[in-house]
Amino acid sequence: MELFTNQVLAGIATGAIYACMALAVVMIYQAIDHLNFAQGEMAMFSTFISWQLMQWGIPYWWAFLATLIISFGGGILIERLLFKPLAKAPILTNVAGFIALFAIVNSVAGLIWDFTIKQYPSPFGSSPFLGSQLISTHQAGMIGVTLLLLILLFLFFQYTRIGLAMRAAASLPESARLVGINTSWMIALGWGMATAIGAIAGILIAPVVFLEPNMMGGVLIYGFAAAVLGGLTSPLGAVLGGFLVGVFENLAGTYIPGVGNELKLPIALALIITVLVVKPAGLLGRPIVKRV
Amino acid sequence: MSAVEEVVTEAPAVEAVPKRAMTLGLGTSLVVLAALVIAPLFVKNFIIFQMTMLLIYALAVLALNILTGGSGQFSLGQSAFYAVGAYTSAILMEHVGMNYALTLPIAGIICFAFGFVFGQPALRLSGVYLALATFALAVAMPQLLKLGFFEHWTGGVQGLVVTKPDAPFGLPMSQDMWLYYFTLVIGVGIYIASVNLLRSRSGRAFMAIRDNEIAASAMGVDVALYKTLAFGVSAGITGVAGGLGAIAVQFVAPDGYTITLAISLFLGMVVGGVGWLPGSIVGSAFIIFVPNIAEGISKGLSGAVFGVLLFLVIFLVPHGARQVAMVAQQMLGKLKKN
Amino acid sequence: MTAMLNIKDLRAYYGQVQALHGLSFSLNEGSLTTLLGANGAGKTTTLRAICNMVRSTGAIEFEGKALSGKSTENVVRLGIAHVPQGRGTFTTMTVEENLQLGAITRNDKKGVVADIERMYEHFPVLKERHTQQAGTLSGGEQQMLAVARALMLRPRLMLLDEPSFGLAPLIVRELFKILGKINREDKVTILVVEQNAQLALELADQAYVIETGRIVMSGNAKDIATNEDVRKSYLGY
């Protein structure tokens, strides 16, 4: 029983990573109705920017803030330049665009900062949290920041005018235009916010997985899976999904025989898909009624 | 408290290609075929090998076109079926000593079954969710192939070496040239069969499902049957392509069938034009040659150059090669009038 | 009386299909006009063309400003509110959020709060349900909400597309009474597209009849209502 509890707790700790990534994924999904495959790479790039700023002597929290602002602006810029022209193109073409963006960002990061692994500092330190061997202070910090982010997003969407406008634009774009909302800019804003959230995710994850251009590959998949599991319309679901995925992954690795590191990912995905077959809209997603 | 549901009247995620426009005209097709037949006589063996790979990937893209462009189901998992086909051929040839040509229909049937079975749980998923499920399949496959459990058959991480066949009846051509024509004949056969499939009642059922699943079901189309059938056919053709690939490349190894292959095939479908079967060869050319071109332009930034080239293509022709063909057709029509 | 909305030679297209074939008409400021016609005649297309929601050619002028080339949201910001077919309610948001959305382009917080109170006075049932999700309201209530949301813009011109659709006759009468009140007291020019010709003609001053994308009849609402030939050939009663 103790092994089980330990693995669950450890799973929650790693799940914080996925929860944070999943928040960024849901953010963008709300804005544009698709999953952006390049989001992990963009988060990685943002993390490298923050690392570079620190290399130039800028203290951690100023670098953090600057990176958030740069990421926000960068996300908007990328959307305006690369994806606004594709707005009328078929969805699959947009997906090809995400793949192209992935290739570009990954390649440029590799060129600028090369592929050697770098250490990345954590503002929370990495001593045992409250004496527990399972959760370090950094992991506790991750969970804390993710929950804080969730609360801030909730407040933003429920109580600000722009938040309301974004929700309307995502829910019924045509009606949103009929009340005067510029839905095109709402999409750009969504990208900006998603990129900034991704930056936070990357900055929190880097101390654990170490900073290198390919660091987000696995994380992004788990982030997608977590977002889908939680229901793509629910930020809370995304966070819950993230923790659950972390736990699934750990338990699968511990209890299913023959499952080494390599098969953890497909098994976790298989579990998630099983949930989806039973509950197609995800755990906390709104059931979608399709009209003919 | 009643949960408010989101009511969605969805535009189909995959846009319809008018039936008439699904293929090239007869004249153009014959010209292309003639070019494909004559070309190898003038080039070196290595180029012939590349052309064989062009045809093989075109088959795989064609299979994806049937699944996505035809029945509207997304798949990021074609690399899994390709791998199964490749390994089936390799194992039958190297462990059982079977003739290479016979392994292909077997690879096709096994993959058809595999795809059909996978299609069952996939029935309840669509769009983003199906993409994730097929993605999981693609990621799992190389790992499954490396499993110690199967090592005796699969050769584990090292894979298996495959013997390339000689031209039969002592024909005076190189192995590469023989394999090319062999692949060409199979490719043309599958292409014609696919075109006929999409024009048949089954094809109409596929397209009805793609355009509006609920309406199709209300009209009496057995949605479950046709969706799994589409998966099966698509997987089967991909399996044959995989088998041919194994023979052409002369070996199979788990890391040759990663998610990168699945993504490449997807890009090939988009660049060729979703649902436009002739575009498969254009898409195949893109995924084979453009990465090489990108590396030629800049070794360090090859990924970025590839991305930029891909963006250029989708900005200029968001609907893929089909768009180019339609514009060309319109211009020809205008010329004929004048 | 000045013409607030001037439409000349409007042609509208859905892809290759032409839906409007050279429509011309104008609306006077303060008038309540109804646009009538059978299903598929082009009534909805006309409203959509005014808001640039469909590809069109021709001249549309609102208070002297040309509307062509403007995005839908910019047309709306000029003071034109459009209550679309099917109401376009944000079903997953509360009644009050829907009203706030109607005023999302306005900067006067106090004015918006005051207007929400006024909407609750016009439509008491909305006040009752103001924290409920809009999707749980009945058809009639959602229609009231849609009209109220449009009014939150403080529009100069309000376009309504078949507000009576799917509603019981009693509710339609109520709704039309309120529309009349809004037209007279708040000085909002109204253009109502309707299939229910009888009720619409009782409400309106002016009427136009559309058939297959062209205006075939125009005039005073009372005259058209009492003209038996017109009623029989174009309005079906």
Image (tube, rainbow, N blue to C red):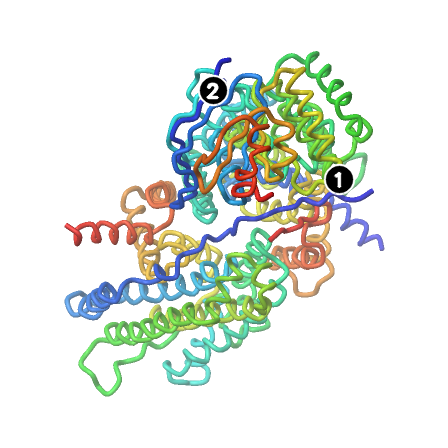
Q: Secondary structure at mark 1?
A: loop
* Residue identifier under label 1: C138
Q: Is residue B188 left or right of residue A173?
A: left
Furthest-right residue in this view: A1
**Number of marks drawn:** 2
Crowdedness near tag 2: few (<14), some (14–19) or many (≥20) residues, C-alpha within 10 Å: many
Crowdedness near tag 1: few (<14), some (14–19) or many (≥20) residues, C-alpha within 10 Å: few
Q: Secondary structure at mark 2?
A: strand
**Viewer-closest of A110 and A118:** A110
- Verify CB contact (< 8 Å) between mark 2 and mark 1: no
Q: Amino acid at mark 2?
A: Phe
Q: Is residue B183 visible?
A: yes
Q: Earlier in the sequence, mark 2 or mark 1?
A: 2
Q: Is residue C166 left or right of residue C194?
A: right
Q: Estimate the x, y position of residue C17 in percent, counting from the top left.
A: 40, 45
Image quarter hosting the C terminus of chain C: top right
Q: Estimate the x, y position of residue C51 in percent, counting from the top left.
A: 50, 29
Q: Is residue A245 visible?
A: no
Disc 2 is attached to a residue of which chain? C
Up-down relation of residue B43 to residue C220 (above or below): below
- Residue drawn at point x = 31 percent, y = 47 percent: B295
Quadrant of residue B301 within the rendered picture: top left
Instruction: Identify the mark at residue A249; answer none if there is no mark.
Output: none
Disc 1 is attached to a residue of which chain? C
Up-down relation of residue A45 to residue B106 (above or below): above
Instruction: Identify the mark at residue C62; answer none if there is no mark.
Output: 2
Q: Estimate the x, y position of residue A10 in percent, counting from the top left.
A: 74, 46
Q: Estimate the x, y position of residue B53 in percent, counting from the top left.
A: 32, 65
- Residue drawn at point x = 44 percent, y = 58 percent: B261
